[in-house]
Each structure stands twice: as structure tokens, then as C-alpha cells.
Amino acid sequence: MPLQDVKESKDYHFPAEEEEVLRFWQEIAAFKEQLRRTEGKPEYSFYDGPPFATGLPHYGHLLAGTLKDIVTRYASGTGHHVTRRFGWDCHGLPVEYEIDKKLNIKSRAEVLAMGIDKYNEECRSIVMRYAQEWERIVHRLGRWIDFENDYKTLDPTFMETVWWVFKQLFDKGLVYRGFKVMPYSTGCSTALSNFEAGQNYKDVSDPAVIVSFPLDGDEDGASLVAWTTTPWTLPSNLALCVHAEFDYVKARDPATGKVYIVMESRLAEIPGAVPKPKKGKKGGADEAAPKGFEVIAKFKGEQLKGRTYEPLFPYFAHLKAQGAFKVVTDAYVTADSGVGIVHQAPAFGEDDYRVCLANGVISKGEGIPCPLDDSGRFVDPVADFKGMYCKDADKEIVRKIKEAGRLVDNGAIMHSYPFCWRSDTPLIYKAVPSWFVRVEEIKPQLLANNEKTYWVPSYVKEKRFHNWLENARDWAISRSRFWGTPIPIWASEDLEEIVVVGSLAELEELTGHKVTDLHRHFIDHLTIPSRQGKGLLRRVEDVFDCWFESGSMPYAQQHYPFENKEVFEQGFPADFVAEGLDQTRGWFYTLMVLSTALFDKPAFKNLVCNGLVLAADGKKMSKRLKNYPDPMEVVNKHGADALRLYLINSPVVRAETLKFKEEGVFNVIKDVFLPWYNAYRFMVQNALRWEAETGRRFEPLSVDVGAATNVLDRWICAASRSLTAFVREEMEAYRLYTVVPYLVRFIDSLTNVYVRYNRKRLKGSKGPEDSSLALASLFDVLLTVCKVMAPFTPFFTEAMYQNLRRALPEGAPESVHFCDIPEAEAAQAGDEQIQTSVERMQRVIELARTIRERHNRSVKMPVKELVVVHPDQGFLDDLTGELREYVAEEVNVRVLTPCADPLKYCSVRAEPEWGVLGKRLGKQLAAVAKAVKGLAMEDILHYEGGATLQVEGCELGPGDLKILRDFCPPEGTKPEEVDAAGDGEVLVVMDLRPDEELVAAGLAREVVNRVQRLRKKAGLQAKDAVAVYIDVKPAAAGAPDVAAALSSQEDYVRSSLGMPILPASQQPADEAILGSEEHSLGGDNGKAEFTLVLTRPGSSGGGSSGGSGGADAVAAALQQAQL
């Protein structure tokens, strides 16, 4: 089938074309067909972390999904079968939080009153609320993943495997029940794990108060003082802690007579204790400082140990008889904040609990004073603040302390504070009973398994994740909630007898009941008879932390070990996982912990970690603030491919942050897709032109492009080989951040070098056979780029491939995504040289343009000579041989002269590398610098060649000097006549002196350019035959002579337009005018004005005078020029 003509770029709407591709994929069931075609090939194992379907996907989801899609498409295209199943996180706080909002539930008691069964079914009803929107958006982004066979954490099969995982840990002795101070969400009424607590820090202002605690029986009536930013914990105070080895002082306030005990180095924190001098009036001396506190004693903290003090509040005063309200010591007290005395509320601080337990203030168990309910509100015996939310009670507590005369200072502090990642409420620390996994016990294995994994970027593994593992604590896996996988522990009331159930069948056997669902309201009533005579064992109330479920995903999605045992074991560890940087403390961590505990293996081999996508202003994306564009609006406006490429070609792929800007997505279309499309369109148009002229079918694969002799054909084929080799190497290493920039540069070279410089050849200027070879080379490269880019831009490459496929032999794969990624080909002899030479040629052309811009000299005005100075004779030979016509055309130069002597057009001087030599030479630098500036040219060239120099007794080697070249114009020339530009390697010298022939050539080029623009304005296609007439108006002396220029440059005009430009006097009256336009050329010395007219040649003429040969001849000439 012949290629189909394609739209102009202005008519190509990327989003609409992508919708067509989506319909095509649906018609051929493309994803299923790809899986079918790759069956039997080696399995590439991929785990997809489960998101919640209670909200819509954001840019972070789309970014991670794009990464996963690229890598798995690439794996499929390189000889693998890749199962891709979508997963859903269905349990946990995110779901319960939504139901609590919906039903206005404020407390645990309200859930129990409602009934766990009704509550859980409410939760079940919303877990897939946005599933269809997720599927639509994910598919619209071009991601191929299986939603039909997805896994859900609420499926009984998934939950059963979670039970199996837990039983394995329990049997290995890695599970225990503890009473621990944990990060606690009052908004969700549950404890959080340490990694959850670290996900949402905010800068907030909190009270900072200093409170006095009078010592019992002190001879000076002294009070200890303690500083805290959590006044709400003061009603639960049971002890004060000092550092045994630090110095403390007893100091009297002369104004009030009160005596305070404080760490010596922190005395200044007490208002007025260490006053500063007051600033005097302008020009006057500072006033003397008021008298500070009088230090009446100094001692070590150890001397305070065991002393008792007066309770701040009466609520727990009765515990004083049991060892509370005394001074204890611990090394965690620091000298860098506060007053060196820390108040202890063991129910609300991890260190507080540890220190009080060690000093006998409290005993192990659940009787610690904790006057807060599950939602963080005060309860009895704290009657004064009963019912108040703890953080809201701060002001009232401070007021009460002040009334009691115990408030020493009342201020505020701005600090970073953890908030609940789900409810966005401040976290507190609270002592709660929990079930733990002994992570600290397996820490050596965790660190060893981390070493077996490969991360991109590597520093996330080596620093962030390694440090997190190094400091890992035991993991609290239980949550006192309702909607989740129940912890399968049945225990006696005294917890002495415990049965852990590892499967549904085991539960049915132990309880004698048929079970179809493992959620709480289906199994909480089931009991197991005690084997120790303790009556009936009942299930503990807790459910699993949902992170335990997602960490179990590798096994649970396969219902391992109950099903798919062999499939799982062959694909474990996974070849690849990818998520955001925040998952180093989330999913990546739980995967590693559970796989290590179960199998002593990492859960994955390769991991790509992306950074965070922020709003354009650098702030977190916020629906409330509306500080970012809706993802689907961006897709519908610019296309999914543009969004994909924008995200992937950004710092976010290196785990850095991206400030999302919609104009960046548009720039991808402008800078990448449109040039790429125009190169493709140009090839198609000229292939169709070639078929029309030759009467043959364009069959690019029948042309041996490897036998090409044209330098740019050889160059683009060499560059294509380099591209495939580079992409293969980098994708094998998962370095997507290097691949996309390389692909973008390649497309830029394809469009701006190969197509631009080869336009005439591709149009047939050197005959049909040469044109066929050039078109086949371009076709081959476009097809290669299609296949290489397919994982990155699946829509655009598919649309392009569907047309290119028409020129391929029968049996070509139906979709570009069924094609193999091209193998890396070995570089051929001369590949490196030709690529280097073309790269240098580009620099020569750019430097020549720089000179023209500097002198405001249009590229349409030819210049007499361009000298290219470079020491590489091979490059100069290429430049004046095969590459000469391209340089001459682009620069518009008559003579191209090579020069291998860099000193012919420049002088050489040296300067010190100040930063390098300054550190080494110190005071000697001045003398050495003076001598360096006076070095002879031969010494400088000798140094540049690799030798060392002795200067003022100092040896100077590589990197010590900077070699500079200054342009030296030829003798007898002025700066405006000869100028140069260089880049440190290539020097270009341009002769700007005009002559009559150059001026005429420039004028002719200007007129031809205006004819071409008029054709475009008239809406003419390349195949449309026209005649061109010009009417030149009389001009003043000094104005450009347009008529003479066209006459002297007739050959150039004919070759450019395929016909001459005829005088208006020869225009037949019966020819239809297609377009006309007035123009002027010239400057301050006078302007030439003329009118151009385009007509459709009539049967009666078309300008036989001048050799146009009528309409047929004009059409034939125009087809040859292919404008």
C-alpha cells in the first residue's frame, strides 16, 4: 500500500490524534495481543504498588505510572513477557476517614453504637468510588496495564495471604505485643507507624512555657524550672529529668526573691536572669545593664537525683507515694535548648516513658496516667479541662498555671511539627498497646539485602534508604480500627494462650464455622476452644496497618502459597518497581522488611525512585489553592505524549523536585513533536512525489542504505546506530534521565541537519535514484526512532508507524508496540569520524551565523570567503570535501577555505587559573602571574601540547594555565570587513566585504524568498504549477537594481523556483491571478519597490518568451523543484 498523505502541522491536533490511536488499540485489543505475542518468552516481573481509589490520580501518580509504563513497554520490546496487573489499596485510614466525614462520626464509641457491620459495609461501598475514573485516566495517558484482573487488598484471597505472612513472622518469633509510646492521630483515633509519622511535617507556632516546680524541704525555697512546647502534657507530669554530669545553679531573682534551679549554661533563658545592656540614645553611651540573678549555689545534676517536688496539678498527686514527682537523671537531656530540666509525662513521650520506667516512676503495664480519650480530649480525673481537645487546652492550662503562681515565662516557638498524613491534624505521642514486628532484630539482614538491590538514583539507596534501615525500629503493625484485615490472633483474656490462624481453612477447622469473608464483622464473633482450660479464645480487636498489606502485595496478589506457587517463586524478587521518593519510608520499606523476614531476600532487584511534582511556585499542589492545572485538562489541550515527555525529561526522574509549568508541556510540542512531525511529513510528501514521477512504488527496505555514499546519509545512519546502542545501554541501567535528552537531541539533529541540509536531494535535485536513497535513509531513521521512542511516546509513534507500515512488506507487525526495540549495532568504520565532523560542521555554521548577526548581515546576502581554522586536517578535508556544499548553502558563502595553522589568524596568550594556583602558591602568585602573562608563544604552545613549564621557580602543569586566543585580522582590513568567532576549538573567519556580484545574488535570493512566501500565502501546494511575474517600479539613484540582479542571477532563480521570474509586461491577460503582493528592498540609500504576481498558466501561453514552455513545462519544472 502506498503511504498516505498527511496533514499540515498546523492541522495536526495531538490530543485528537491520540484519541484515534486509543480507538485503534481498542479495536485490535492491543495490550492483550502484545501479551499473547510474548507468551513463552522470559518473564519480566513487575510489582505495581496499590493506590487508594477514594481519590483521583494526581501528577505524582501519573509520573510514577509513566515511569512504569516506559520500563515495562521497553522490557516487552526486548524479548520479555511482562504481566502488568493494577492493584487497589482498599483498607485503612483513608477509607475510614472518608466515612467518618460522610456520617459525621467523631468517636470510636459512635462506630460501635452504629455497628461494625454497618460501618464496614459503608467503607466497602466507597473503596472503588473512583475506579472507573482511574482506569479512564490511566488508559488516556497511554499506560498499558490490566484492570480486568486487578488485585484488591479487600479480596479474601489477598487477606488470606496476609494472614499467612503474619503467621510466618509469628512462628519465627518476630511478633510481640508491647506497650509503647507511638505517634498517634487524634483525627483518625489510631496509632501510626514511625514512617507514617514522618510523611507530613509543617512549620507551626506552638506555646513555649517555663514552669516552676517547688522542691520539697529546700532550705532556700528553690523551685526547679522546666521548659515545654506542649503545655497540654503538664497535667500528666510525673517527674523531672536532669543530666547527671551537667552543671546546674541555684539563682535568686533580686526583684522577687524567688529562687530557681536551672542548668548553668541555660540560665539566660529565665527572663531577667542575665540582662543585656540597654542601648543609649543616639550618640550616647549604652546604659548599664540592670542587676541579674544572684547565683547562690552550683552543683552537678547528679545531686538533684531523687529529690521530690510539689505536683503542678492535683489529678495524680496520689502517685507521689508510689515514687512519682521526683527528679531523675538521663543523658538524653541536652544543653542546646530549653533550661536543662525536662518535664516527664510518660504517657506522651517515648523518652519520658523509658526514663520513668527505668527510675521506678511507673511500672510496666497499662496503668500509666493517660487522661485523653481516643480523639485526644481530656477525660477524668482532669476535671478542669474535661472534654477539651488537648491542643486547644494549651491556653487554659497556661492560664491555670499562671493563677497558681507557677508560670515563669510564656512565649511561642516556630518549629517543624508532624501532622497526620490522612486527617492533616497534629500528631501527638501517646502510650498505646500494639502488636509489633521485631525489625531491629533483623536489621543486619535488611542492610545486607539492600546492598543486593540496584536503585536509580543510587544516592537514595545509599543514603536515605540505608540510613532509614540503619535507624529502623520495631514496627507497630496493629491499628485499633475497623475496616482492615483483622489480625488473626485468638487469645485468652490473660493473653497467656494465643493461637495465630494462617489460613481460611484453618479458621474453619478451629471454629467449626464456614467462612466466606475475613473482615471483622464476619469473624469477630467466632471463638476457638482453649486447649489450656481457659474457656474460649476470642480474636483480638485490632486490624493490620494497611502498610502491612501493601508490603505483602508480592505474595498476596498471587494468593501465595495457596495458589500460583511456581509462578510466584520464578518471578521473585521482582525485576522492577517504581514509586516516589516518599515511599522510601513507606512501600519500599515494608516490601524490604517482609521479604527479608520471610525469605531473607529483597523484594525487588531494580528500583526507580522519582521526586515530587510541585506547583509552579514551588509549593505543594493543593486542590484548595488551585495552584496547578488539572492533569486531564493538560492532556486534552496538549496531549498525553507531551505530558509524558515533559515529566520524564525533568529533574523529577532523578528523585529531585519538579515545579510543574504548563508552558513546559507546550514547549515539548513546539521543540520536539512539531519538528519531528515535519520531518516525517516532508518524507511522506516527497515519497509520494517520487512515486508520481517514477511510476514505481516506494519500497524503502529494498534500498540498501548501507551502501550510501552521501556524507549525510552515512552520518544519519551512524547517528541512528549510536542512538540504539545508547538507548539499549542506558535503559538496561534504568537511567531514563539520560535517555530522553539524548533522544531529543537526536530528533533535533534529524530535523535541523539531515532534513534541512538535504531538502534538495530529498526533492530529487540529483535524480530519482539519489532521491530514493535519501528518502529510504530518512524512512529507515524515522522507523528506528519510532520503535525506540515507542515506550516513551506511545501515541505519536503509533500514529506515525501506521503510515510507515504501508511502505513495509506484508506481515509487518500491526502495531509499533508489537515491534522489537532495535538491537544495538556495532559501530562501523568511520562512524565516529563522520559524526564528529558533522558536529563540528554545525558549530562552523553556528559561528558563521553569530558573525552575521553581529554585523546585521542577512543570510540571504552571500559573503565572499569563510576560513575555517582547526588543527585536525581530517576534519578540514571533510569540510572542504563532502560537507562543503552544506556549509556553503547554509552560510551562503562563495569560497570555503581550510586552515590548519591556528596562529595565522590569532595570537596566543596565557593567564593563570587563579582558583587553582592561588591555593597552591599563596604570596608567590603575583610574581608567577606576571611572568605567565609575558610567556613567549612557543612556550605557550609547548605547554598546550602537554609539557610542563618552570615559571619563577614553580612548575606549572595541566590545569594551571588558561590558554586564550585573540583574533588578528589580516593586514590592511578593517573590523567591519573581516571578523571572526570561535568556541575554543574551531575558529571561523568571515570576509564581509561586498561586491556587485554578491549584492546581486543577495537581491535575487530575497526576491525568491518572497515568491515562496507568496505561494504559501496563496495556499498553494508543491505540485501546483504557477507562473511568476514582477513589476519593478522606477527607483532613485542608490537604490538596489532588482531587475539587473534577477537578470544576472537567472540560473539561480530557475534552479530555486523551477522557472524564471518574468516581466509583468509578458503576463497574458487571460491567466487567473492566484496572488499578488507589493514589496520593497533596500536601506537608507534608497529603496526598490516591486510587485510580484502569481498566475495559473493558461492554454494560450504562460510565458513562452524566456523559455517557460507553457503550463505543462512550468508544471514539470515545478515538480522538479518541489517547492
Image (spheres, rainbow, N blue to C red):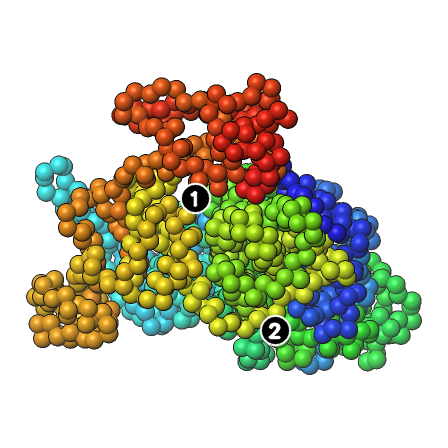
x and y, in percent, of residue 1064 in the image: 48, 22
x and y, in percent, of residue 196 in the image: 58, 59
Camera-nearest residue between 21 and 154: 21
x and y, in percent, of residue 428 in the image: 55, 55
Residue, x 35% and y 54% (percent of image)? 844
Q: CB atoms at circles 1 and 2 under 8 Å apart?
A: no
Residue type at tag 1: Glu
Residue 403 - label = 1
| Total numbered circles | 2
Q: Is residue 333 left or right of residue 14?
A: left
Residue type at tag 2: Lys
Q: Is residue 365 above or below residue 287?
A: below
Residue 419 - label = none
Residue, x 17% and y 46% (percent of image)? 973
Q: Quadrant of the C terminus?
A: top right
Camera-nearest residue between 304 and 647: 647
Other residues around mark 2 within 10 Å, as few (<14) / some (14–19) / many (≥20): some
Q: Is residue 502 left or right of residue 339?
A: right
Give the residue at mark 2: 605
Q: Nearer the viewer, mark 1 or mark 2?
A: 2
Q: Can residue 830 be seen by looking at this rendering? A: yes
